[in-house]
Image (cartoon, rainbow, N blue to C red):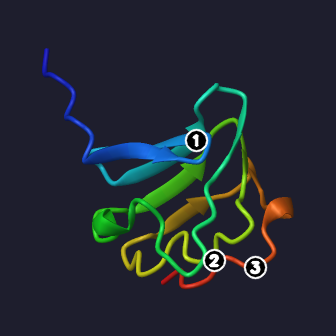
Amino acid sequence: MEAAEANIAEGTSGTCTWTISADGELVIKPTNGEEGTLANFGTCNAPWYDYKNEITSARFEGKVFGGSNCSYMFNECSKLTSLNVSNFDPSNNGRKIRNVH
């Protein structure tokens, strides 16, 4: 039996946790497992920005609310080819998500 590959990176943002798996999937989910809110990125990049070239897909688990400004959530993620936002609620977000390449 082969051991699972380790995550590329992981961290927190607001009341959510995020991981980037070895195959490049970014998963953002509430820390409590039910619902959470991302931090406000403002004009700064998301906390996973340093790994932007590793991210190939992204999805939200549980109920994730955007902070008041998440416009740089996927800034310069040029390898992102799949984005599932079905569990993302942007109602707190006064600005659109932009810079998805």
Q: Is residue 19 visible?
A: no
What residue occupies the far top of the structure in this picture? Answer: 1
| 61 vs 90, nearest the viewer | 90
Residue 50: image x %, image y %?
30, 67
Neighbours of disc 3 within 10 Å: few (<14), some (14-19), many (20+): some
What's the mark number on residue 69?
none
Q: Are marks 3 and 1 in contact (CB under 8 Å)?
A: no
Relative height, residue 19 to residue 94 (above, below)? above
Q: Residue at x 39, y 60 (%)?
A: 48
What's the mark number on residue 95?
3
Q: Is residue 45 visible?
A: yes
Residue 14: image x %, image y %?
59, 47
**Which residue is label 1 attached to?**
16
Instruction: Look at the numbered disc 1 and give the secondary structure of its residue.
Output: strand
Neighbours of disc 2 within 10 Å: few (<14), some (14-19), many (20+): many
Instruction: Look at the numbered disc 3 and give the secondary structure of its residue.
Output: loop
Reading the chain from its start, which is encountered first: label 3 or label 2?
A: 2
Q: Are marks 3 and 2 in contact (CB under 8 Å)?
A: yes
Q: Amino acid at mark 1?
A: Cys
55 lies left or right of 94: left
Whole-Å distance between the Cαs marked 3 and 2? 6 Å
Reading the chain from its start, which is encountered first: label 2 or label 1?
A: 1
Residue 34: image x %, image y %?
72, 28
Q: Amino acid at mark 2?
A: Ser
What's the mark number on residue 71?
2
